[in-house]
C-alpha cells in the first residue's frame, strides 16, 4: 500500500507566473508520455512479473513516478498562481480555465484527456519491460522538448532533474530485462502458460 | 558502448580499476547472460564511487557514470 | 514601521531555515532512492547495501529534527503529532 510523505522529492521554484509554459508542461502530467502514464504502467505491470527484481523495481519506479507527477503538478500550480482568466485565455489556456479554473487536470496541452490506451500490459515480461524502456525514452525526449521551450531557468532546473531520472530508469529497466531474459532462458518456460518445454 | 562519447566529470576522480574510463566492467560476462539474437540488452552498471548527497540531488543521480548532460 | 520590517526579516529567515532542513532531507532521501533502485537490480552488491544502510539512521535523524519544528512528514501511524492535529497544516508541498 502507499503512505504519503509530505514533501516533494526535489525542490520546485519558479521565477514567476507563466501560463504559456504551464500549458506545455501539462503534457508530463496527463499526456501520453507523462508521469501518470509511467506510474500506472509500472504499478500495473508488476503483478505479472516473474522475478523479485522486476517486481521490486516496477513497484519502486512506479512510486517514484507518482512523486514526479506531484512535481509536475506543483510546476503547473506555481506557474498559474495569481494569473487572471484573461491572462489564461491569452496564453491559450482559455479552454482549460473554462473547465478547470487553474486546477491541473490529466490532459495533454491540447486538452485531450488522459486515456488508458496510453499504456499496455501484455503479461509477457520481455514485452512489458521493453515497453517500459521505450516509455523512459519517450519521457526523456519530452522533457528535452520542454527544456527547449522553457524561458524560466528555475523551471529548466526542475525539468533537467526529471529528465536525468528517466535516463537512470532506462538503465534499471534494461538491467531487469537482462535478468528476466536470463531467467526465462534457464527456466525454458512459456511465460504465459507456465508449461515446461519438452526437450527433443 | 561508445567510450569516446563519455565525458568524465572533472571534479570526480576515476575508479581505481579503470583510470580515466567509466565504471563499465572489463569482463561483462559475470552477470551478463549469453547474448541471443532478437533480444535487447543493456550493459550492466557496477557501482564505483558516488556523489555526495548534495551533488547527487543536483545531478539527478548518485552515479557519475549515469549523468547525461542536456543540452550535450 | 520598524516592527513590520523586523517581522518580515524574521519570517524570511525562518522560511530559509525550514527550506535548508527540508533540502537536507531531500538530499539524503534521494541518495537512498537512487541506491534503492540500484539494489533492486543488484541485490548482491555489498558496497551499495552498506552505503544504503548507513544513510538510514542519518535520514531518520534529519526527519525527526524537521518534524520537531514543523510537524509530521508522515501519517497513517508513522509519526506522532502535537495538539491540534498537525498533519493537515499548511504549507503543503506544492505551496512551499
Image: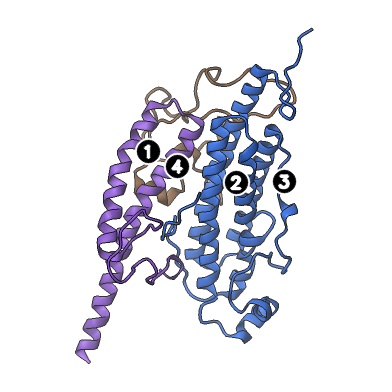
Chain colours: A blue, B brown, C purple
- The residue tagged with tag 1: helix, strand or loop? loop
- Rounded to the nearest whole Å, what is the CA distance between mark 3 and mark 1? 41 Å
Residue A117 on image: x %, y % = 75, 53
- The residue tagged with tag 3: helix, strand or loop? loop
- Rounded to the nearest whole Å, what is the CA distance between mark 2 and mark 3? 12 Å
| CA neighbours of label 1 inside 10 A, class few (<14), some (14 to 19), many (20+) | few
Q: Residue furthest top?
A: A200
Name the mark on residue A120: 3
Residue B22 on image: x %, y % = 47, 31
Give A73 or A115, whichever is nearer the viewer: A115
Disc 2 and disc 1 on one polypeptide chain: no
| CA neighbours of label 4 inside 10 A, class few (<14), some (14 to 19), many (20+) | many
- For disc 1, the marked residue is B12
Residue plotted at (45% across, 44% down): B61
Rendered image quadrant of residue A125: top right
Can you tell which of label 1 and label 4 is closer to the viewer?
4
- For disc 4, the marked residue is C34
Q: Residue furthest bottom?
A: C1
Chain bearing tag 1 is: B
Residue plotted at (27% across, 76% down): C11
Chain bearing tag 2 is: A
Can you tell which of label 2 and label 1 is closer to the viewer?
2
Name the mark on residue A12: none
Residue C29 on image: x %, y % = 38, 48
Rendered image quadrant of residue A84: bottom right
Can you tell which of label 4 and label 3 is closer to the viewer?
3
Chain bearing tag 4 is: C
Disc 3 and disc 1 on one polypeptide chain: no
Give A158 or A199, whichever is nearer the viewer: A199
Amino acid at each position: 500500500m502507499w503512505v504519503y510523505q509530505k514533501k516533494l522529492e526535489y525542490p520546485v521554484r519558479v521565477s514567476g507566473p507563466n501560463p504559456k509554459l504551464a500549458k506545455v508542461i501539462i503534457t508530463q502530467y496527463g499526456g501520453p508520455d507523462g508521469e501518470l502514464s509511467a506510474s500506472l504502467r509500472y504499478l500495473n505491470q508488476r503483478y505479472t512479473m516473474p522475478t523479485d527484481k522486476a517486481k521490486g523495481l516496477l513497484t519502486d519506479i512506479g512510486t517514484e513516478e507518482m512523486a514526479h507527477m506531484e512535481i509536475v503538478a506543483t510546476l503547473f500550480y506555481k506557474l498559474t498562481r495569481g494569473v487572471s482568466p484573461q491572462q489564461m485565455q491569452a496564453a491559450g489556456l482559455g479552454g482549460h480555465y473554462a473547465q478547470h479554473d487553474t486546477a491541473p487536470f490529466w490532459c495533454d496541452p491540447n486538452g485531450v484527456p488522459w486515456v488508458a490506451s496510453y499504456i499496455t500490459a501484455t503479461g509477457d515480461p520481455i514485452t512489458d519491460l521493453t515497453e517500459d524502456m521505450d516509455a523512459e525514452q519517450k519521457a526523456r525526449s519530452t522533457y528535452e522538448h520542454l527544456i527547449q521551450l522553457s524561458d524560466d531557468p528555475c523551471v529548466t532546473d526542475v525539468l533537467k532533474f526529471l529528465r536525468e531520472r528517466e535516463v537512470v530508469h532506462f538503465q534499471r529497466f534494461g538491467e531487469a530485462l537482462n535478468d528476466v531474459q536470463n531467467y526465462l532462458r534457464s527456466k525454458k518456460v512459456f511465460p504465459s502458460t507456465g508449461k515446461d518445454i519438452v526437450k527433443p | 558502448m561508445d567510450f569516446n562519447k563519455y565525458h568524465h566529470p572533472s571534479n570526480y576522480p576515476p575508479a581505481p580499476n579503470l583510470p580515466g574510463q567509466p565504471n563499465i566492467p572489463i569482463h561483462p560476462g559475470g552477470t551478463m547472460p549469453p547474448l541471443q539474437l532478437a533480444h535487447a540488452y543493456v550493459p550492466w552498471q557496477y557501482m564505483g564511487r558516488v556523489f555526495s548527497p548534495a551533488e547527487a540531488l543536483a545531478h539527478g543521480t548518485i552515479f557519475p557514470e549515469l549523468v547525461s548532460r542536456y543540452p550535450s | 514601521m520598524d516592527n513590520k520590517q523586523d517581522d518580515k526579516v524574521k519570517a524570511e529567515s525562518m522560511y530559509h531555515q525550514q527550506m535548508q532542513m527540508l533540502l537536507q532531507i531531500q538530499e539524503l532521501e534521494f541518495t537512498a532512492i537512487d541506491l534503492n533502485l540500484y539494489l533492486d537490480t543488484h541485490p548482491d552488491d555489498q558496497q551499495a547495501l552498506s552505503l544504503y544502510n548507513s544513510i538510514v539512521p542519518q535520514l531518520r535523524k534529519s526527519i525527526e529534527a524537521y518534524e520537531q519544528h514543523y510537524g509530521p512528514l508522515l501519517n497513517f501511524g508513522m509519526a506522532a503529532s502535537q495538539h491540534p492535529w498537525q498533519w493537515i497544516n499548511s504549507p503543503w508541498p506544492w505551496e512551499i
